[in-house]
Amino acid sequence: MRRRSANSGRMGRSASGAMPASRISPSVLASARASPGLPTSGCSLPSSPVPAQACTTRAQSASMASSPTGTRRRAARTCDATAAAAPSSEKRCQPKVARRRALRAIQRTRTLPIASRSDIRRPVGYSPGRMEVSNPDRLVFPEIGRTKGDVVAYYERIAPRAFPHVAGRPVSIRRYPKGLAAAGFFQKNVPDHYPPSIERFPVPRSRAASKKHPTKKDQEFTVYPVLGEPAHLAYLANQGAIEIHVPTSVAADLFHPDRIVIDLDPPPGSFARVRRAAAIVRDALAAHGLASVPVATGSKGYHVVAPIRPSVASDTVAATVQKFAALLASRHGEELTIVFRVALRRERVFVDWLRNTPIATVVAPYSLRARPRAPVATPLDWAEIETTDPDAFTIADVDRLLDRADPLAALASAPSDAARFVAEVDAAFESAGLVFETFDRFRS
């Protein structure tokens, strides 16, 4: 973000800047929805298309209209902020090739082999409420002597507390089949051998994701698991999973998030800076009507999580949270930054808004972390944050975790109004004279 110049309406970056690989282009999905007769099984599309993340100012649009041909071509890829919601503007911003690609991706969900559950192989040793652990003595956390059997047992015990935070959401898992002594990997697609009680949720892959993570097959969709019962957490642990990650929305309403997550990534050293950053974020959210809870991530920092009513489209929420982060960085420039590259952050805390983009994920509360001491992501009360480090709770604290209250679950029962947050942040951003820029991880 930068401040708007008095004699120039140009933005610092073009609207074609790269987005995170996991993001599904809203224009692609909106173009698919606009075509009659297409199924939307698996991926529920937004009821109304949302504009592209970066929009020109009115002054920029006017200057482009009288500029040379090359500039006009660039302008054709950008939506005017005041006209983005209009059908004609929407059509102008969606290339035909992207539209055709979206149609093919959505149509393929009609013929997914998972539509029938009779051919899904039931894994050996699994039945609802009972599971045989494979290789229970394998060391998963060598530094503390914890085995795979310990990991499965942890998820069996913590499941009643953890399940409400993952139920109904597309799940990504971080697997370490040989423990931390060997490399791990993220897994999104459901293997054929998962039990039929784990739902399958197909989502069209973005073009960027297909390029970055090519598959052996010409696969234009990712089929996520959706857990249907608490015992599924232990089942995933038996498959070598350590970490559980979920998006900020449920599968049934994928493009209307029910949580806002601000991920605070501190510089090395004391936790004092990130604690101060969490308090700044809490107070700023509260000023716009959002109550929040801190989550000790089990890693280096904290998440500040605000449950919201799922009434605002995900792209609107993501853009607003990016503006919110920019406002905080402009007001607290010595303490906070939105600079993506670590080398340029200096001693400031990175206010990461990217967890709120569509299909982006965040570590689930009560998930173990793949770190030597087996820490646990744990919701806290605000009164605890000054004395509780981000990695304070570990696999050994399961009794303490079960005895504690869950402040995030309690707050989620009374979510805040996201519409007010969007309106007030937009107004504050405009008043501050900042210019909204599309995120490019290679230039930010």
Image (tube, rainbow, N blue to C red):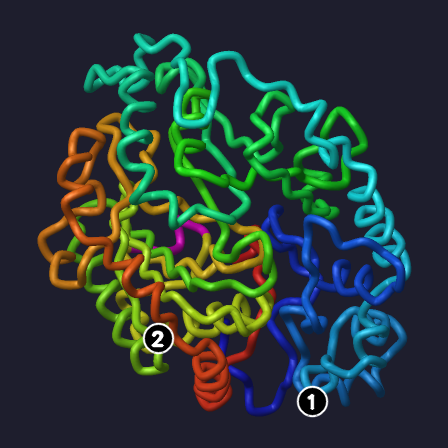
Residue 422 position (above or below residue 117)? below
Residue at the spot 26% in from the left edge and 29% down from the top edge: 374
How far from the left and from the top, in percent, is residue 185?
Answer: 50, 27
Horizontal arrangement in the rendering, residue 383 relative to residue 94 (left or right): left
The image shows a total of numbered marks equal to: 2
Residue at the spot 83% in from the left edge and 86% down from the top edge: 65
Is there a contact, CB below 8 Å, between mark 2 and mark 1?
Answer: no
How far from the left and from the top, in percent, is residue 355?
Answer: 47, 55
Q: Quadrant of residue 78?
A: bottom right
How far from the left and from the top, in percent, is residue 106?
Answer: 80, 49
How far from the left and from the top, in percent, is residue 66?
Answer: 84, 87
Neighbour class for label 2 at 10 Å: few (<14), some, many (≥20)? many
Residue at the spot 19% in from the left edge and 19% down from the top edge: 144
Sequence order check: which comes first, mark 2 or mark 1?
1
Q: Which residues are magenta?
A: 341-346
Residue at the spot 62% in from the left edge and 25% down from the top edge: 191
Q: Amino acid at mark 1?
A: Arg
Local secondary structure at mark 2: loop
Horizontal arrangement in the rendering, residue 379 relative to residue 255 (left or right): left
Local secondary structure at mark 1: helix
Kindly report the distance in space between the C-alpha atoms of the residues bearing marks 2 and 1: 31 Å
Is 262 included in the stretch rendered in magenta? no
Residue position for label 2:
290
Q: Quadrant of residue 399?
A: top left
Residue position for label 1:
58
Residue 177 position (above or below residue 340)? above
Q: Nearer the viewer, residue 283 or 107?
A: 107
Q: Quadrant of residue 241?
A: top left
Q: Amino acid at mark 2?
A: Leu
Q: Nearer the viewer, residue 60 or 200?
A: 200
